[in-house]
Image: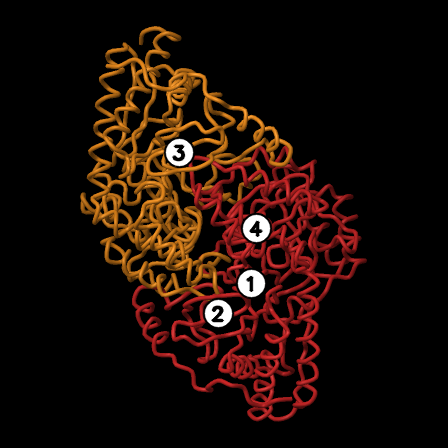
Chain colours: A red, B orange
């Protein structure tokens, strides 16, 4: 295993530092949300200059293999030619206009064709728009209020689901009841607690809570969840925002044969263009037509044209098997490296969305040493959030990533010792 | 006043009809939200092909002078060269990337420079994101829950504020207390009802509730509202989503000398590119840095580059006085026409955002006859929502619009008689 790579270990940071200073004067805390670098090791940039394929460049010109894929949206590579051509053609006609363009219907037809449970589609902007709209439709359909959600799961950043309670009122969460992912008895207890007022159960295709090991779904749990919803007359809502089209080119639970009633999509469906979707089965269409949800840019045409091209290319270009293959290369390499370095890790999740944790690393000190070293060697991964593969990642990218992770494991071993 | 215009009064609709039929199969109700043509007269298209300057073309090739401006986002004209150049330059570098681009800081600096009350900025996608974030910041800052809002005002489409109660639970509205716009005694009563738990008062720069006459703010009301918030220790939140940069090239209440603590912006700030902003005063910065709000596309660079170009051009190209001038031409012409036709109307609001209602028209029958006829004559206005001027509307556009509105008034007079 090579221990040197052809780039400096002290990367330029002056432009980034200057922008951070300007940002602190006009943005609360200097930055906010999931893309804030405030809690990341100092080797990470906050501001980026450009992107192409699987690579990004920060404002100081440093290049990175991007294994975060913009936290999911990039799935075919930055500036994928087919997606860019479709977006450019629509842009030449119009984008935000007096009403939607024909590509909105094409995008809806394509999603209904691709995702087995879907009989209809609605579009929005944020993943949070999509999950919130699913709840609203389920409540309109059932006339009930309560929603069962897995404790610790992330379903967006609105007051009912955001990660921090600052500014959130008890009433924002009053209709949420929590269960434990993969624990059907806990769902039954939550359903009992709802006392006939359960509008829906929301679930992610697998557990991907930041800071924890990922956990794939037990197919038995999925089937019992479906049966429980049927008996209770509650909607089963699938949150595909983070997972959609990375595990399967239809719904993520199609391989295990369990269909939700409603599903929320965003991130990868437009390869970076801003679009979200709610998909539903026929029996929820009437309720969906009654609720009022909208946004100034929800009918924007370019992202819908990009979504048509993206979803088409995901299947035609074999994106899912490609991510499976390179993700497995990466996982296998990391497991080997950790063993060779004598560092105890827990590498979990599907190959396209791996999550790395270090044993005994509750304060993330090991993860930060690792990820900072990896960033210094030109590869972006995250100390607390799952990583993302894309169809644009090549064998050479994975080899370069493994050169960097090897440096990361060495640094962890050097700083924290064995184990 | 000319009574003929040089285009057919029976416009082609075959492509639109075919798309509507396809849409009904895959979109609940065929369409949803504010851009649904379901409740509009049959002369309106649902789907649009392209747009340029102040004009749009539907999928059957029919051209329109667009006096709806995409319900606000278009302010400088579709495909404004300066905005398009800035967006294209940023797009060539990158859009949704591993993190924000430098233009995010530039956009924040520009907004802080333009809007008097603003010491900082945060960005989002939807107007609803911006208003909801203002509430969350106010609650985080004050540790209180209640928000006072004007009855009937539109502040977005989340459960706490959407127009229809389908799928909305009582808990979603439990912390809202309603007052009457321009009625300070009603605000005092609402504040008393909040009993020391008022986090904020949210207000629009003027009353623009769909289906009602618009009402400009009484400067005395605005000043007393500010004083009442100060005494109560509650934040004054200004909803500039619909109004922002159409009335003034800073905050809409700057001419009357009343500053909010927080303001929500979207629609026009990117000339159609999808971006929203929260602006705030220094004393709310710490709370803003504590809350967790984010979205997959909130750090997208192209809309921020577009916003910098848009906000710059609004001042440099004199957009506000241009809209004031053409809007006044339109208002004056419509008032004259209505009098000449013997049709009683109520034309209200600022020239850049006029609202037309017909006397005794509770079922909107007159408004629909009028707007349908106007659409048939190649001009888009709305029977229930305020219209929007842009800086791209020319004198020739206004003349053409007035040709169409004259036909509209004739049709109303013919169908409903005088009065």
Residue B355 lies in what quarter of the image? Answer: top left
Single out the mark in the foreground, 4 or 1.
Answer: 1
Mark 4, secondary structure of its residue: loop
Residue denoted by label 3? B56
Task: Tell me if A233 is positioned left or right of B225 in this view.
Answer: right
Alpha carbon distance from label 1 to label 3: 33 Å
On what subunit does the disc labeled 4 rest?
A: A
Alpha carbon distance from label 2 to label 4: 42 Å
Alpha carbon distance from label 1 to label 2: 10 Å
Rendering coords of residue B114 (x, y %): 24, 54
**First in sequence: mark 4 or mark 1?**
1
Rendering coords of residue A317 (x, y %): 66, 58
Task: Tell me if A240 is positioned left or right of A48 in this view.
Answer: right
Rendering coords of residue A238 (x, y %): 66, 51
Mark 3, secondary structure of its residue: strand
Q: Which mark is residue A174?
A: 4
Task: Evaluate whether residue B281 shows in this view.
Answer: yes
**First in sequence: mark 1 or mark 2?**
2
Alpha carbon distance from label 3 to label 2: 37 Å
Q: Which mark is residue B125?
A: none
Residue denoted by label 1? A77
A211 is higher (above) or lower (below) than B391: below
Residue denoted by label 2? A56
Quadrant (top left, top right, bottom left, bottom right) of the C terminus of chain A:
bottom right
The answer to whether tags 1 and 3 share a subunit is: no
Q: Are marks 1 and 3 in contact (CB under 8 Å)?
A: no
Crowding at mark 1 (Cα within 10 Å: few <14, some 14-19, many 20+): many
Alpha carbon distance from label 4 to label 1: 41 Å
Crowding at mark 2 (Cα within 10 Å: few <14, some 14-19, many 20+): many
Q: Are marks 1 and 2 in contact (CB under 8 Å)?
A: no
């Amino acid at each position: 295993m090579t221990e040197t790579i052809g780039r400096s270990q002290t990367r330029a940071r002056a432009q980034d530092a200057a922008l951070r200073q300007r940002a602190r004067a006009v943005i609360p805390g200097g930055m906010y949300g999931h893309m804030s670098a405030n809690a990341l090791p100092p080797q990470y940039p906050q501001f980026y200059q450009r992107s192409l394929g699987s690579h990004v460049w920060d404002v100081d010109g440093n290049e990175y293999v991007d294994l975060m894929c913009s936290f999911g949206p990039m799935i075919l590579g930055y500036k994928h030619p087919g997606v860019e051509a479709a977006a450019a053609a629509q842009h030449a006609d119009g984008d935000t206009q007096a009403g939607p363009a024909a590509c909105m219907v094409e995008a809806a037809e394509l999603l209904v064709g691709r995702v087995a449970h879907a009989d209809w589609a609605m579009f929005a902007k944020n993943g949070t728009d999509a999950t919130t709209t699913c709840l609203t439709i389920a409540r309109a359909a059932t006339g009930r209020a309560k929603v069962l959600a897995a404790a610790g799961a992330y379903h967006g950043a609105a007051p009912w689901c955001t990660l921090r309670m600052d500014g959130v009122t008890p009433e924002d969460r009053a209709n949420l009841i929590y269960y434990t992912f993969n624990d059907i008895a806990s769902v039954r207890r939550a359903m009992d607690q709802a006392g006939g007022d359960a509008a829906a159960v929301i679930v992610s295709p697998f557990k991907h809570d930041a800071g924890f090991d990922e956990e794939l779904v037990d197919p038995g749990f999925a089937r019992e969840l479906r049966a429980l919803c049927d008996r209770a007359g509650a909607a089963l809502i699938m949150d595909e925002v983070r997972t959609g089209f990375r595990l399967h080119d239809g719904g993520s639970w199609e391989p295990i044969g369990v269909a939700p009633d409603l599903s929320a999509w965003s991130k990868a469906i437009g390869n970076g263009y801003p679009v979200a979707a709610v998909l539903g089965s026929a029996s929820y269409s009437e309720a969906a037509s009654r609720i009022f949800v909208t946004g100034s840019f929800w009918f924007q045409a370019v992202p819908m044209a990009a979504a048509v091209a993206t979803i088409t290319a995901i299947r035609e270009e074999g994106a899912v098997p490609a991510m499976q293959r390179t993700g497995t290369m990466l996982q296998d390499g990391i497991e080997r490296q950790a063993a060779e370095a004598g560092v105890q890790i827990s590498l979990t999740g599907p190959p396209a969305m791996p999550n790395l944790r270090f044993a005994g690393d509750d304060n993330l000190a090991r993860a930060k040493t690792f990820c900072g070293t990896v960033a210094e060697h030109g590869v972006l991964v995250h100390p607390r959030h799952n990583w993302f593969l894309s169809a644009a990642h090549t064998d050479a990218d994975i080899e370069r990533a493994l050169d960097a992770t090897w440096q990361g494991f060495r640094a962890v071993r050097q700083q924290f010792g064995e184990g």
